[in-house]
Amino acid sequence: MSVSTGKPVIELKDVKVHHPARTGGLFRPNIVKAVNGVDFSISRGETVGIVGESGCGKSTLASVLVGLQAPTSGQVLFHGKPAIKRSARMRKEFGRAVSVVFQDPATALNPRMTIQDILTDPLQVHGIGNAASRSDKVKELLALVGLPQSAAEVTPSQVSGGQRQRVAIARALALDPDIIVADEPTSALDVSVRAQVLNLLSDLKTQLNLGMVFISHDIQTVRYVSDRICVMYFGQIVEEGPAAQVFDNPSNDYTKKLLGAAPSLLHT
Ligand SMILES: Nc1ncnc2c1ncn2[C@@H]1O[C@H](COP(=O)(O)OP(=O)(O)OP(=O)(O)O)[C@@H](O)[C@H]1O
Ligand SMILES: [Mg+2]
Protein backbone atom coordinates (compact mmCIF):
# COMPACT_ATOMS: atom_id res chain seq x y z
CA MET A 1 0.00 0.00 0.00
CA SER A 2 1.12 3.53 -0.64
CA VAL A 3 2.34 5.72 2.13
CA SER A 4 1.54 9.39 2.47
CA THR A 5 2.63 11.44 -0.53
CA GLY A 6 3.29 15.14 -0.59
CA LYS A 7 2.14 17.84 1.75
CA PRO A 8 -1.01 17.58 3.87
CA VAL A 9 -4.15 19.02 2.32
CA ILE A 10 -5.70 19.46 5.76
CA GLU A 11 -3.99 19.56 9.12
CA LEU A 12 -5.58 19.80 12.55
CA LYS A 13 -3.51 21.05 15.44
CA ASP A 14 -4.63 20.49 19.02
CA VAL A 15 -8.26 20.66 17.95
CA LYS A 16 -10.89 20.66 20.67
CA VAL A 17 -14.64 20.63 20.33
CA HIS A 18 -16.43 21.05 23.64
CA HIS A 19 -20.19 21.18 24.17
CA PRO A 20 -22.14 22.19 27.27
CA ALA A 21 -23.83 19.00 28.49
CA ARG A 22 -27.51 18.76 29.34
CA THR A 23 -26.64 17.41 32.77
CA GLY A 24 -24.93 20.60 33.92
CA GLY A 25 -26.44 23.57 35.72
CA LEU A 26 -26.74 27.06 34.28
CA PHE A 27 -23.75 28.43 36.16
CA ARG A 28 -21.71 25.25 36.37
CA PRO A 29 -22.27 23.49 33.06
CA ASN A 30 -20.73 20.08 32.59
CA ILE A 31 -18.73 19.93 29.41
CA VAL A 32 -18.80 17.17 26.82
CA LYS A 33 -15.33 17.00 25.35
CA ALA A 34 -16.34 15.50 22.01
CA VAL A 35 -12.88 16.10 20.55
CA ASN A 36 -10.18 16.87 23.06
CA GLY A 37 -6.80 17.83 21.64
CA VAL A 38 -6.40 16.09 18.31
CA ASP A 39 -3.50 16.46 15.87
CA PHE A 40 -4.29 15.01 12.48
CA SER A 41 -3.27 15.36 8.86
CA ILE A 42 -4.40 13.98 5.55
CA SER A 43 -2.59 14.10 2.22
CA ARG A 44 -3.48 12.94 -1.28
CA GLY A 45 -2.82 9.29 -1.98
CA GLU A 46 -3.27 7.97 1.56
CA THR A 47 -6.19 6.40 3.36
CA VAL A 48 -6.37 7.15 7.05
CA GLY A 49 -8.78 5.09 9.11
CA ILE A 50 -10.33 6.54 12.24
CA VAL A 51 -11.75 3.93 14.54
CA GLY A 52 -13.31 4.01 17.97
CA GLU A 53 -16.50 3.18 19.80
CA SER A 54 -19.77 5.08 19.54
CA GLY A 55 -19.55 8.58 21.03
CA CYS A 56 -15.75 8.84 21.00
CA GLY A 57 -15.88 11.88 18.69
CA LYS A 58 -15.34 10.48 15.20
CA SER A 59 -18.17 12.34 13.51
CA THR A 60 -17.33 15.54 15.35
CA LEU A 61 -13.76 15.26 14.09
CA ALA A 62 -15.10 14.62 10.57
CA SER A 63 -17.28 17.72 10.68
CA VAL A 64 -14.27 19.84 11.65
CA LEU A 65 -12.23 18.27 8.85
CA VAL A 66 -14.80 19.08 6.19
CA GLY A 67 -15.44 22.57 7.57
CA LEU A 68 -19.00 21.99 8.76
CA GLN A 69 -18.08 22.86 12.32
CA ALA A 70 -15.50 25.22 13.79
CA PRO A 71 -13.48 23.86 16.70
CA THR A 72 -13.74 25.38 20.17
CA SER A 73 -9.96 25.80 20.03
CA GLY A 74 -6.99 24.69 17.96
CA GLN A 75 -6.05 25.17 14.35
CA VAL A 76 -7.29 23.92 11.01
CA LEU A 77 -4.85 24.39 8.13
CA PHE A 78 -5.79 24.00 4.48
CA HIS A 79 -2.69 23.64 2.30
CA GLY A 80 -0.76 25.12 5.21
CA LYS A 81 -3.00 28.19 5.61
CA PRO A 82 -5.28 28.89 8.59
CA ALA A 83 -8.77 27.87 7.51
CA ILE A 84 -11.18 28.36 10.39
CA LYS A 85 -12.22 31.83 9.31
CA ARG A 86 -12.20 31.37 5.56
CA SER A 87 -12.47 34.06 2.94
CA ALA A 88 -15.18 33.52 0.34
CA ARG A 89 -12.54 32.36 -2.09
CA MET A 90 -11.01 29.87 0.31
CA ARG A 91 -14.45 28.59 1.27
CA LYS A 92 -15.15 27.81 -2.35
CA GLU A 93 -11.80 26.12 -2.91
CA PHE A 94 -12.19 24.20 0.37
CA GLY A 95 -15.66 23.08 -0.74
CA ARG A 96 -14.23 21.79 -3.99
CA ALA A 97 -11.20 20.10 -2.51
CA VAL A 98 -12.82 18.36 0.46
CA SER A 99 -15.97 16.33 0.16
CA VAL A 100 -17.89 14.01 2.37
CA VAL A 101 -19.83 10.76 2.19
CA PHE A 102 -22.25 10.16 5.05
CA GLN A 103 -23.52 6.98 6.60
CA ASP A 104 -27.01 6.93 5.21
CA PRO A 105 -27.46 7.76 1.53
CA ALA A 106 -31.25 7.66 1.94
CA THR A 107 -31.16 10.88 3.96
CA ALA A 108 -28.06 12.42 2.33
CA LEU A 109 -29.63 12.59 -1.13
CA ASN A 110 -32.61 14.75 -2.05
CA PRO A 111 -35.42 12.27 -2.76
CA ARG A 112 -37.18 14.61 -5.19
CA MET A 113 -34.21 15.13 -7.51
CA THR A 114 -33.20 12.79 -10.31
CA ILE A 115 -29.74 11.33 -10.03
CA GLN A 116 -28.78 13.44 -13.06
CA ASP A 117 -29.75 16.59 -11.13
CA ILE A 118 -28.06 15.40 -7.92
CA LEU A 119 -24.78 14.98 -9.80
CA THR A 120 -25.12 18.19 -11.80
CA ASP A 121 -25.91 20.32 -8.76
CA PRO A 122 -22.35 20.72 -7.37
CA LEU A 123 -21.09 21.67 -10.84
CA GLN A 124 -23.78 24.33 -11.17
CA VAL A 125 -23.16 25.69 -7.68
CA HIS A 126 -19.46 26.02 -8.50
CA GLY A 127 -20.19 27.42 -11.98
CA ILE A 128 -18.25 24.67 -13.72
CA GLY A 129 -18.78 24.00 -17.43
CA ASN A 130 -21.91 24.33 -19.55
CA ALA A 131 -24.95 22.09 -19.99
CA ALA A 132 -23.15 19.80 -22.42
CA SER A 133 -19.97 19.39 -20.41
CA ARG A 134 -21.95 18.81 -17.21
CA SER A 135 -23.95 16.10 -18.88
CA ASP A 136 -20.70 14.46 -20.02
CA LYS A 137 -19.38 14.71 -16.48
CA VAL A 138 -22.49 12.96 -15.13
CA LYS A 139 -21.89 10.10 -17.59
CA GLU A 140 -18.28 9.89 -16.50
CA LEU A 141 -19.22 9.88 -12.79
CA LEU A 142 -21.81 7.14 -13.23
CA ALA A 143 -19.25 4.99 -15.05
CA LEU A 144 -16.63 5.70 -12.38
CA VAL A 145 -18.84 4.38 -9.57
CA GLY A 146 -20.15 1.43 -11.57
CA LEU A 147 -23.72 2.60 -12.13
CA PRO A 148 -25.59 2.14 -15.42
CA GLN A 149 -26.16 5.29 -17.46
CA SER A 150 -29.93 4.72 -17.13
CA ALA A 151 -29.61 5.56 -13.41
CA ALA A 152 -29.43 9.25 -14.37
CA GLU A 153 -33.14 9.36 -15.12
CA VAL A 154 -34.45 7.97 -11.84
CA THR A 155 -34.63 9.27 -8.27
CA PRO A 156 -32.59 7.82 -5.36
CA SER A 157 -35.56 5.84 -4.03
CA GLN A 158 -35.73 3.91 -7.29
CA VAL A 159 -32.29 2.33 -6.88
CA SER A 160 -31.00 -0.11 -4.25
CA GLY A 161 -29.26 0.93 -1.03
CA GLY A 162 -25.83 -0.01 -2.36
CA GLN A 163 -26.49 1.90 -5.57
CA ARG A 164 -27.68 4.91 -3.56
CA GLN A 165 -24.37 4.98 -1.73
CA ARG A 166 -22.65 4.83 -5.15
CA VAL A 167 -24.67 7.93 -6.13
CA ALA A 168 -23.50 9.68 -2.95
CA ILE A 169 -19.91 8.73 -3.79
CA ALA A 170 -20.33 9.99 -7.36
CA ARG A 171 -21.63 13.28 -6.01
CA ALA A 172 -18.66 13.52 -3.66
CA LEU A 173 -16.39 13.11 -6.71
CA ALA A 174 -18.16 15.64 -8.93
CA LEU A 175 -15.75 18.49 -8.22
CA ASP A 176 -12.58 16.37 -8.51
CA PRO A 177 -11.78 16.65 -4.81
CA ASP A 178 -8.38 16.08 -3.21
CA ILE A 179 -9.86 14.52 -0.09
CA ILE A 180 -12.94 12.46 0.69
CA VAL A 181 -14.10 12.04 4.26
CA ALA A 182 -16.31 8.96 4.54
CA ASP A 183 -18.14 8.70 7.88
CA GLU A 184 -19.35 5.12 8.38
CA PRO A 185 -20.04 4.82 4.64
CA THR A 186 -21.04 1.16 4.80
CA SER A 187 -22.78 0.93 8.18
CA ALA A 188 -26.29 1.58 6.87
CA LEU A 189 -25.91 -0.84 3.98
CA ASP A 190 -26.98 -4.42 3.67
CA VAL A 191 -24.12 -6.72 4.68
CA SER A 192 -24.08 -8.25 1.21
CA VAL A 193 -23.09 -4.99 -0.51
CA ARG A 194 -20.70 -3.59 2.11
CA ALA A 195 -17.61 -5.22 0.64
CA GLN A 196 -18.48 -3.92 -2.83
CA VAL A 197 -18.78 -0.34 -1.63
CA LEU A 198 -15.53 -0.67 0.34
CA ASN A 199 -13.78 -2.01 -2.74
CA LEU A 200 -15.16 0.83 -4.82
CA LEU A 201 -13.87 3.45 -2.36
CA SER A 202 -10.49 1.82 -2.23
CA ASP A 203 -10.24 1.53 -6.04
CA LEU A 204 -11.27 5.16 -6.50
CA LYS A 205 -8.70 6.31 -4.00
CA THR A 206 -5.94 4.62 -6.01
CA GLN A 207 -7.29 5.56 -9.42
CA LEU A 208 -7.79 9.24 -8.57
CA ASN A 209 -4.92 9.55 -6.07
CA LEU A 210 -7.40 10.79 -3.46
CA GLY A 211 -6.75 11.29 0.19
CA MET A 212 -9.36 9.36 2.10
CA VAL A 213 -10.44 9.59 5.70
CA PHE A 214 -12.36 6.46 6.49
CA ILE A 215 -14.34 6.45 9.72
CA SER A 216 -15.82 3.37 11.31
CA HIS A 217 -16.51 1.81 14.67
CA ASP A 218 -15.47 -1.51 13.13
CA ILE A 219 -11.73 -2.01 13.27
CA GLN A 220 -11.71 -4.81 10.70
CA THR A 221 -13.37 -2.58 8.10
CA VAL A 222 -10.87 0.15 8.80
CA ARG A 223 -7.96 -2.24 8.49
CA TYR A 224 -9.20 -3.45 5.14
CA VAL A 225 -8.91 -0.03 3.50
CA SER A 226 -6.38 1.97 5.52
CA ASP A 227 -2.70 2.76 5.13
CA ARG A 228 -2.61 4.49 8.49
CA ILE A 229 -4.93 4.06 11.46
CA CYS A 230 -5.90 6.42 14.26
CA VAL A 231 -7.63 4.91 17.27
CA MET A 232 -9.91 7.36 19.08
CA TYR A 233 -11.01 7.08 22.67
CA PHE A 234 -12.95 9.74 24.56
CA GLY A 235 -12.11 12.54 22.12
CA GLN A 236 -8.43 11.76 21.79
CA ILE A 237 -6.27 9.81 19.39
CA VAL A 238 -4.73 7.20 21.68
CA GLU A 239 -2.83 5.28 19.04
CA GLU A 240 -1.69 6.10 15.53
CA GLY A 241 0.48 4.22 13.07
CA PRO A 242 0.72 2.19 9.87
CA ALA A 243 -2.23 -0.22 9.67
CA ALA A 244 -0.07 -3.34 9.99
CA GLN A 245 1.71 -2.01 13.03
CA VAL A 246 -1.46 -1.03 14.87
CA PHE A 247 -2.86 -4.49 14.19
CA ASP A 248 0.14 -6.66 14.78
CA ASN A 249 1.71 -4.67 17.54
CA PRO A 250 -0.85 -2.47 19.28
CA SER A 251 0.79 -0.45 22.02
CA ASN A 252 -2.32 0.91 23.63
CA ASP A 253 -4.54 -1.11 25.95
CA TYR A 254 -7.71 0.24 24.42
CA THR A 255 -6.55 -0.76 20.93
CA LYS A 256 -5.85 -4.26 22.20
CA LYS A 257 -9.35 -4.42 23.65
CA LEU A 258 -10.85 -3.17 20.42
CA LEU A 259 -8.95 -5.77 18.43
CA GLY A 260 -9.98 -8.56 20.74
CA ALA A 261 -13.62 -7.55 20.79
CA ALA A 262 -14.20 -6.90 17.11
CA PRO A 263 -15.88 -9.42 14.88
CA SER A 264 -15.40 -8.60 11.22
CA LEU A 265 -18.38 -7.25 9.33
CA LEU A 266 -16.97 -8.89 6.24
CA HIS A 267 -17.43 -12.28 7.82
CA THR A 268 -20.79 -11.78 9.50
N1 LIG B 1 -24.06 19.45 19.51
C1 LIG B 1 -23.73 18.67 20.55
N2 LIG B 1 -24.05 19.03 21.81
C2 LIG B 1 -23.70 18.26 22.87
N3 LIG B 1 -23.01 17.11 22.75
C3 LIG B 1 -22.66 16.70 21.52
C4 LIG B 1 -22.99 17.46 20.35
N4 LIG B 1 -22.50 16.81 19.27
C5 LIG B 1 -21.89 15.70 19.74
N5 LIG B 1 -21.98 15.63 21.09
C6 LIG B 1 -21.41 14.58 21.95
O1 LIG B 1 -20.05 14.45 21.61
C7 LIG B 1 -19.64 13.09 21.67
C8 LIG B 1 -19.02 12.65 20.36
O2 LIG B 1 -20.05 12.53 19.37
P1 LIG B 1 -19.77 12.00 17.90
O3 LIG B 1 -21.04 12.03 17.15
O4 LIG B 1 -18.63 12.76 17.31
O5 LIG B 1 -19.32 10.49 18.18
P2 LIG B 1 -19.05 9.31 17.13
O6 LIG B 1 -17.73 8.74 17.49
O7 LIG B 1 -19.25 9.77 15.74
O8 LIG B 1 -20.18 8.26 17.53
P3 LIG B 1 -20.98 7.22 16.58
O9 LIG B 1 -20.03 6.05 16.37
O10 LIG B 1 -22.15 6.82 17.44
O11 LIG B 1 -21.35 7.90 15.32
C9 LIG B 1 -20.87 12.31 22.10
O12 LIG B 1 -20.82 12.12 23.47
C10 LIG B 1 -22.00 13.21 21.72
O13 LIG B 1 -23.11 12.96 22.53
MG1 LIG C 1 -20.58 9.17 14.19
Image (cartoon, grey):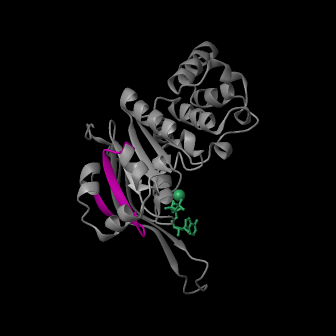
Residue 258 percent location from the top left of the image = 38, 64
> The N terminus lies in which quarter of the figure?
top left
Left or right, 152 with respect to 52, comes to: right
Q: Main secondary structure of the magenta part?
A: strand
Left or right, 251 with respect to 168, comes to: left
Q: Is residue 258 visible?
A: yes
Q: Quadrant for ligand 1?
A: bottom right
> Where 80 falls versus 149 (above or below)?
below
Q: Name the residue at the right extreme.
A: 112
Residue 52 percent location from the top left of the image = 43, 61
Residue name at image x 67 percent, y 46 percent: 107
* Res 16 quadrant in image: bottom left
Residue 119 within the segment the image draws in magenta: no
Residue 227 within the segment the image draws in magenta: yes
Q: Name the residue at the top extreme.
A: 132
> Where 94 falls versus 251 (above or below)?
above
Residue name at image x 65 percent, y 31 percent: 118
> How many numbered marks are there?
0
Residue 236 percent location from the top left of the image = 37, 66
Residue name at image x 61 percent, y 21 percent: 148
* Res 199 quadrant in image: top left
Q: Is residue 14 visible?
A: no
Question: Which segment is the magenta one?
Answer: 225-240
Residue 38 percent location from the top left of the image = 36, 62
Q: Nearer the viewer, residue 11 or 188?
A: 188
Q: Nearer the viewer, residue 23 or 204?
A: 204
Residue name at image x 53 percent, y 19 percent: 140
> Where 163 falls versus 140 (above or below)?
below
